[in-house]
Amino acid sequence: MSQWCVMLRARRRALERDLDLVLATPTDCQLTRDLLARGGRARDQLLTFCDFPGEVKPTNNVSESSLRPSVPQRKVANGDRARWAADFEAGVRTAVDTARLAGEGPFKTILNIVTH
């Protein structure tokens, strides 16, 4: 096993310990409890980047960056004052970007989502 793998595994164990401490934090705030519960449910996925170094980034900056250009367009062109409209726009953008990253056509991907 390479030195890099040993170091990465040690770092993952340290991150898991830190994550356990954060998720076990007692609080009187219901919003914080809800957030901690969501983190607990996603716990197994939070450190995926450690299992696939170089393939999975530790942030969601790719997703955030791909949605960013659509915000001004949505605000100017669509005038999404309704929450459902903003959610719909974000869903379409996400489907289109996911299709692009997977090397598939956006129309086919959206059609598949709508029909299944």
Image (cartoon, rainbow, N blue to C red):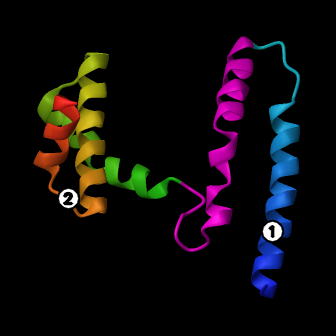
- Measured as percent of width and height from the top left, residue 84 is found at 28, 18
Magenta span has 37? yes
- Measured as percent of width and height from the top left, residue 41 is found at 66, 31
Which residue sits at x=60%, y=68%?
52
- Measured as percent of width and height from the top left, residue 34 is found at 68, 19
Q: CA distance from mark 2 to mark 1?
A: 34 Å
- Measured as percent of width and height from the top left, residue 45 is found at 62, 47
Q: Amino acid at mark 2?
A: Glu
> Looking at the rendered structure, which numbered label has been put on residue 112?
none
Residue highlighted by disc 1: 9
Main secondary structure along the magenta-highlighted residues: helix
Which residue sits at x=19%, y=46%?
109
Residue 68 is at least partly visible in this image: no
Which residue sits at x=18%, y=26%?
79
Residue highlighted by disc 2: 104
Q: Residues within 10 Å of mark 2 (few under 14, many from 20)?
A: few
